[in-house]
Amino acid sequence: MKELEIIIDKMGEIRVHVKGVKGSACLDYTKWLEELGHVIGRDLTEEYYESEVKIDQSFYVSNR
């Protein structure tokens, strides 16, 4: 499950944690928020370095 956790501290600093998204696609989930201010740091999780596996499977069934 994909999840976006946003924490705003008392000083107004925002921390964002993207869960359930592998690879650099996680950056797409935070792009809208980054456009609102200045990014002061980024800590990449293990999921960032994983690749998302996509399986395209097709098959045909015959009743002969």
Image (tube, helix red, strand yellow):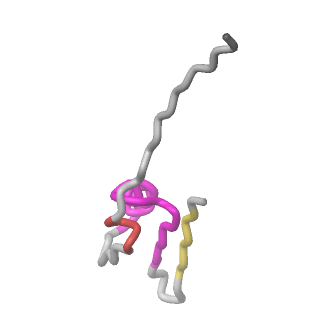
Q: Residue furthest right?
A: 63
| Quadrant in which the C terminus appears | top right
The residue positioned 53% from the left and 89% from the top of the image is: 10
Horizontal placement of 8 versus 39: left or right? right
Tally of numbered discs: 0
The residue positioned 47% from the left and 35% from the top of the image is: 56
Q: Choose between 8 and 61: the one closer to the eye.
A: 61
For residue 22, say whether it is visible.
Answer: yes
Residue 34: x and y in percent read 38, 63
| Quadrant in which the N terminus appears | bottom right
Residue 47: x and y in percent read 40, 67
Q: Is residue 63 above or below residue 28?
A: above
Judge whether residue 18 is colored magenta.
yes
Judge whether residue 36 is colored magenta.
yes
Among the 4 quarters of the image, the one containing residue 51: bottom left
Q: Is residue 62 above or below residue 10?
A: above
Q: Choose between 33 and 44: the one closer to the eye.
A: 44
Residue 50: x and y in percent read 36, 63
Q: Choose between 24 and 60: the one closer to the eye.
A: 60
The residue positioned 57% from the left and 64% from the top of the image is: 3
Q: Choose between 38 and 63: the one closer to the eye.
A: 63
Q: Is residue 5 above or below residue 57?
A: below
For residue 35, say whether it is visible.
Answer: no
Over which residues does the magenta segment extend? Answer: 14-37
Residue 33: x and y in percent read 44, 61
Q: Residue furthest bottom?
A: 10
